[in-house]
Image (cartoon, rainbow, N blue to C red):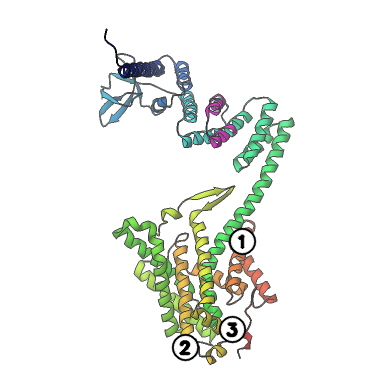
Amino acid sequence: MYSIDPTLRALRVYIATLAVLFAVLVHSAGAGAAEIAPLINALAQGNFDDREKAIENLAATGDAGVAPVLEALDGGNLYLRKTDGSVWIVRKEGDSLTLVDPRSGAAAGAAGADEIEKIKVNNRLRRAIDAALGSLTLLSGDVATRLNAAQAVFKSRDPTKIAAIEKAIAAEPDAGVKIAMEQARAAALLTSDASDDIKLASITIITARGDREALELLQSLADRSTGPVQTAALAGAHSIASELAAWDAAQNVWYGLSLGSVLLLAAIGLAITFGVMGVINMAHGEMVMIGAYTTFVVQETIRTSYPGLFDYSLLIAVPLAFIVAGAIGVLIERTIIRFLYGRPLETLLATWGLSLVLQQAVRTMFGPTNREVGNPSWMSGAFELGQITITYNRLWILCFTLAVFAILLAMLRYTALGLEMRAVTQNRRMAASMGIATSRVDALTFGLGSGIAGIAGVALSQIDNVSPNLGQSYIIDSFMVVVFGGVGNLWGTLVGAFTLGIANKFLEPVAGAVLGKIAILVLIILFIQKRPRGLFALKGRAVEA
């Protein structure tokens, strides 16, 4: 007698177990394929009624692998091979026809046109195919696919998909997708001949959804219903409408903040130059335009030479736009503005003429048409916050604006230039008598205001057309913001920009875009009659004689 090593015995048992399991898996897979194959072949048999039943049987398997077969049938690419009655997907490549296995997707050689026959479908079968594909996607292994399928059922409200979606709900592991499926089931039940009790329960689910599609569904149900169902549908619609009105107000506030951030960026530089120097600079909008074109040049250079850096293009453009626009601003102050202090009409006309010169120079260099400035990936797209849609480019511009505002406040408060600018703003003569070179402060102030306008152009290039007329769209609004908030007061400019932005967005739906702006202008004129120096007037300038 020979004894067997216990370790060897255990290894043999382990190998035998694996062999049995492998055999079972192979048998199961083969059985599954064997069960599906006759259902696929049945698509070519009998009349249209028989084929509709075959489609339903395929959908009932819950096997997402049959979706390509149904899609091929719908697209006219499913054929019967006459020799053995099997069904194949046919791929057409020029004049040749290639048979493709409907289950594995593997090519199985060429076929002659006389060897195969297209499986015909009509509109009724196409509807059955759509329903079958919907039920199969509801059982997909991908969460996003199941969610999209549930949303499609909600929009279609097709009562024929109730059974499929109930089956999907029972098997759904994801809580969010399950809620979407339950809402889709409720929408389908409301269009079916279900009992009033079932419809009342469905109305509760739809009301909880609370969006515009739910409101439309309940309003439609109320129009065609009577009794308790109509009452419940009207109550649900009223509840959703009230909630949506609040969300609409919140959306308008967001739009107003977004517009206000744009106005603040465009006006903050003007607030500095106008507040410190008292100069009405009609060419301020062109500084914004120069910043936008600087962004365009940076992106073009990156596209042609360093495409991998495109997502950093705005980070590169911001300091360059500040330097370019600021340098041009210093040049303008040194060559034109310094000779016109105390002559507001001549200054206004000179800067207006300068704005025309700058616009024509840009047209000559870049052409009169709009230029494309792209959005980096981190500024593209949007997200939902409740019922509010927030785009990333507007959100980043708001954050950027507040950052610029904070940096500018810190600079004015904690740097030597800032202290000198504040001194000149409050009392120019006293500042000069204390040894401050007011002419140098004027040049640097004008350059600072122009540089900030340049970085405003970087931001505006992400939401507006980059063209020679870009700055003209914001110059009047910028002056309104500065005058309304208080000349030279940055906090007043901040409050004025956001106030006018929000007011404009609430007036637009009522009066229209043009009349809304006119109404804002009239209100500012009336306000200035009561407070000529704006919301937050600076103290101390009146002592200048």
Which dot marks residue 426?
Answer: 3
Q: For residue 113: magenta?
A: no
Q: Where does the magenta region start and end?
A: 161-182
Q: Earlier in the sequence, mark 2 or mark 3?
A: 2
First reached walking from the N terminus: tag 3 or tag 1: 3
Circles 2 and 3, Cβ within 8 Å, touching? The answer is: no
Q: Would you say residue 368 is visible in this rendering?
A: no
Residue 79 x/y as whole percent: 34, 22
Question: For the residue marked with disc 1, what is the amino acid?
Answer: Ile
Quadrant for the C terminus in the image? bottom right
Could you say where residue 367 lies in the image, as x and y percent from the top left? 36, 66
Looking at the image, the residue that sits furthest to the top is: 1
Q: Which one is nearer the viewer's eye here, 461 or 514?
A: 461
Please determine whether, in this image, residue 166 is positioned above or below residue 344: above
| Percent coordinates x, y for residue 199 in the rendering | 67, 29
Query: Which residue does the numbered mark 1 point to in the structure image?
Result: 502
Q: Is residue 507 visible?
A: yes
